[in-house]
Image (spheres, rainbow, N blue to C red):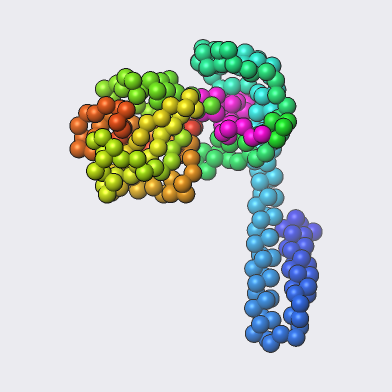
Amino acid sequence: MRIRDLVVVISLIFATCQFLAVPNVLSQPPKAKLADLEAELAKARAKVAELEGKIAEIKSGKDADKKLAGAIVMSYLSADGWEKRLPFVLNPEKVEPLMRVHYKGGNTASRDTNILTVDRDIQNENIYLVTAEDKTGKPYGSAFVVRKTTDGFKVDWPASVGYNETPLAGLRANFPDKPVKIRVLAKIGDYYNFEYQNAKNTHFNVSLRDPKQGNLPGYVAKTAEEGKRLYELLKDGKDHELIVEITALGPGGGSIDAGHGVAITRVVSESWYDPSEK
């Protein structure tokens, strides 16, 4: 018997058992019994579809890829010290000096880890998002971004830790003359002050925070495409990991102090993974 046929048989048996278990189902009027049958049939079909999806995933090797993505994160976190994590990261020569500064004086000792979830990125089939917790059951702050490369699976370190060349605190003090691309935790806010104090009807306020605990108030026009996109992403009121492009401009387009607010000109990525970084 083929796997598909076996799945169908099992699911139909499951549906039949569920139907017969419904109290007083045989004593119900014909229309009621038909509705119950249709409901159980819908459940059976959904179960078949779910099992077929899992079977297809196993046959295609994607299930194995998920296990490998989880395993590389386990190896990365099990390494005793940031230097020993370098073999597990993407572009180690490039990120070594960044990690050296980032972890200066910090604790990167080996940690016992449990993998919680491994999900394939919906926009890139070679990207995996891995969540994990330490031995005490405390989840890591953000998902680890793992890339499938010709050299195997590697942790995308900048994307995993939310690395920025210049954090928000630095931009607040000295914003350059050109737009800046930055990884942030973004959340819909209600802060309107300085040049944006009268912009509540025309602009969304987006609270921008980075892993270094820097923050800036961001603004985007409600009628702009990026404004509509951001609202849909953030309307649940939660923090979301994004890469955005910002510039120190007021609602009228004039230059302002970045501490007063920044204009969000573009959503680069709906995660901390940057498609432009190879």
Pinpoint residue 276: horizontal percent, then vertical percent: 43, 29
Q: Quadrant of the N terminus?
A: bottom right
Q: Is residue 231 left or right of residue 4?
A: left
Image quadrant where residue 50 sits: bottom right
**What residue is rendered at 68% in x and 86% in y?**
30
**Residue nearest the observer in this picture, 71 or 21:** 21
Task: Determine the image quadrant of residue 38.
Answer: bottom right
User: 71 left or right of 183?
Assistant: right
Residue 45, given in percent of the width and then of the height, sits at: 66, 64
Q: Nearer the viewer, residue 271 or 11?
A: 271
Measuring from the top left, give residue 88's x and y in whole percent. 63, 21
Q: Position of residue 170 (x, y in %)?
A: 38, 20
Q: Seen in the image, is 158 located left or right of residue 267?
A: right
Check if residue 146 falls in the magenta segment.
Answer: yes
> Is 6 rendered above or below residue 225?
below
Question: Along the horizontal axis of the image, is 233 left or right of 128?
Answer: left
Figure check: 105 above or below 118: above
Could you tell me which residue is drawn at 34 percent across and 26 percent down?
180
Q: Is residue 237 magenta?
A: no
Q: Is residue 20 above or below residue 221?
A: below
The magenta segment: 138-160
Nearest to the observer: residue 228 or residue 214:
214
**Which image quadrant is residue 175 in?**
top left
Residue 96 in view: no
Q: Is residue 178 above or below residue 20?
A: above
Residue depicted at x 22% and y 28%: 255
Is residue 129 in view? yes
